[in-house]
């Protein structure tokens, strides 16, 4: 974080998934806590990051390919091709869903949502 945000304004938000709150990860975060601001995020809360949607879409597209990728280079090529096949407004469409997602999360008081 100190390299990426040398001005000391770095911010970290992690989802408190089990691996992220292990003793090793927790100790590392505590040791470097002066390097960034850490946002509290409720454990196992609904995913609000559109990156998950992008990952799922790419995974689905690669799984439909025939023949399936057999090497890491094949996989990289398949992912890049799948990304390039997304329509130009794909990311903006995901961004546009954020108000609905946040409203749904607020209605559920941080619980599970079906956005």
Image (tube, rainbow, N blue to C red):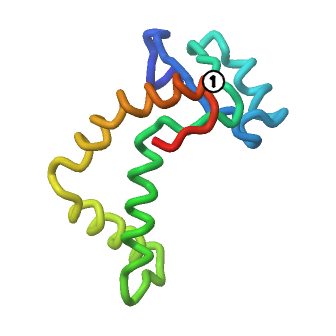
Locate residue 9 relative to residue 108 in the image: left or right. Answer: left
Q: For mark 1, what is the residue? A: 41
Q: Quadrant of residue 7?
A: top left
Residue 58's x, y, as percent? 38, 62
Q: Which residue: 76% across, 41% down?
A: 18
* 20 relative position to 94: left or right: right
Question: Which quadrant holds residue 37?
Answer: top right
| Residue at horizontal 33 percent and vertical 37 percent from the top | 97
Horizontal side of residue 13 vs 81, given as left or right:
right
Classify mark 1: residues with Cα within 10 Å, few (<14), some (14-19) or many (20+).
few
Out of 65 and 70, give the one closest to the viewer: 65
Furthest-left residue in this view: 88
**Residue 69 % position (x, y):** 43, 81
Decide: is 35 above or below 17: above
Q: Secondary structure at mark 1?
A: loop
Which corner quadrant holds the C terminus?
top left
Q: Name which residue lies at 47% across and 73% down.
A: 72
């Amino acid at each position: 974080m100190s390299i990426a945000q040398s001005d000391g304004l770095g911010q970290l938000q992690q989802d408190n998934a089990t691996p992220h709150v292990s003793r090793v990860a927790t100790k590392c975060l505590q040791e470097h806590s002066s390097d960034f601001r850490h946002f509290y995020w409720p454990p196992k809360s609904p995913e609000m990051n559109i990156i998950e949607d992008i990952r799922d879409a790419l995974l689905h597209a690669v799984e439909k390919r025939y023949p399936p990728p057999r090497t890491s280079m094949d996989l990289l090529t398949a992912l890049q091709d799948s990304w390039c096949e997304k329509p130009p407004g794909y990311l903006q469409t995901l961004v546009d869903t954020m108000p609905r997602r946040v409203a749904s999360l607020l209605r559920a008081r941080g619980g599970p949502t079906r956005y």
